[in-house]
Amino acid sequence: MSTIEIAQFACLSDNYGYLVHDAESGQTACIDTPETGPILSTLDARGWTLSHIWNTHHHFDHAGNNLEIKEKTGCQIIGPAGEAERIPGIDVKVDDGDTVKLGAHDVYVLNVGGHTLGHIAYHMPDTQNAFVGDSLFVLGCGRVFEGTMAQMWESLQKLAALPDSTTVYCAHEYTAANAAFAVSVDPDNDALQTRVQKITALRADGKPTVPTQIGLERATNPFLRPHDARIRAQLGMAEATDVDVFAEIRARKDNF
Ligand code: ZN
Ligand code: FE
């Protein structure tokens, strides 16, 4: 099994675009279509030909350039079945439990609805990568626009259950703001404090904080830690359910 190459590049004000390339087959997938120019120029610079778009959800900064990129490359568009009518040019509708292929690599689709109802993530277990769109961020998670807090919590638990060494590619650089909030609900977490120092240094150098890893998020991301006794104490919710603690953390972040 060949390895894969991943190109990460900035798009719009705070999005990341990704290209995943399998050298053996020559196939290349683009995760979402935040901005046409950087996607096409990165393909050109690498000498890669786009075979697929993998959409995570219908928001404009994720599917807004689908038709232009499909027209220019002839690629196939794979996207969330649950919001297919809002994914321009969709060819293949997928949802939880489905698999797609990049060359010989199996790519597993997870439904991680909540930010939008049909939001999906793409997990490549053999190379230990996951492309999660706006579901999980570094020290944060997506705003719950369409689903319920319970649905979002269930979705995040699916991601948290991936192997700790899974590399997570999120769609936005929101980390500095997320870090400030995380410390406010989990002030005594040494792993979080150490991480915030590294993040501050990266951002001071203008460097990305993405990708991240599942194990690191499990240790430091408050949205994956509603079971944590210190967070519960900080929120005055020692006896609450995990989903209620998660909902309180999400609500506080919305107003932070
Ligand atoms: Zn979004
Ligand atoms: Fe987004």
Image (cartoon, rainbow, N blue to C red):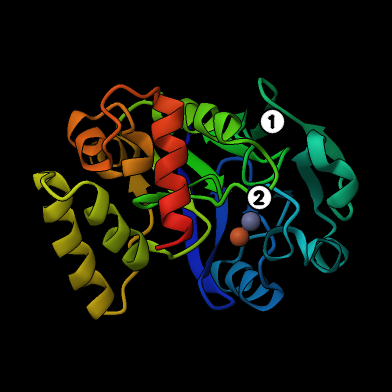
Q: Within the image, what quadrant is residue 74 found in?
A: bottom right
Q: Residue at x 39, y 63 (%)?
A: 256
Residue 107, image x and y in percent? 60, 31
Question: What is the CA distance from the residue labelled 1 to the residue labelled 2?
Answer: 27 Å
Can the viewer see residue 125 in this picture? no
Is the shortest distance between ligand 1 and the CB of mark 2 under 8 Å?
yes
Q: Which residue is mark 2?
A: 145
Residue drawn 39% across the image and 44% down it: 249
Relative vertical location of residue 245 with respect to residue 8 in this rendering, above or below: above
Q: Between disc 1 and disc 2, whose residue precedes? A: 1
> 144 or 30: which is nearer to us?
144
User: Left or right: where does residue 120 sit relative to residue 134?
Assistant: right
Q: Residues within 10 Å of mark 1 (few under 14, many from 20)?
A: some
Residue at numbered disc 1: 100
The percent position of residue 135, horizontal first and vertical second, equals: 54, 45
What number of labels is visible?
A: 2
Image: 41 above or below 133: below
Q: Amino acid at mark 1?
A: Val
Q: Quarter-wise, where is residue 110 in the image?
A: top right
192 relative to 48 in the view: left or right: left
Kind of element beneath mark 1: strand
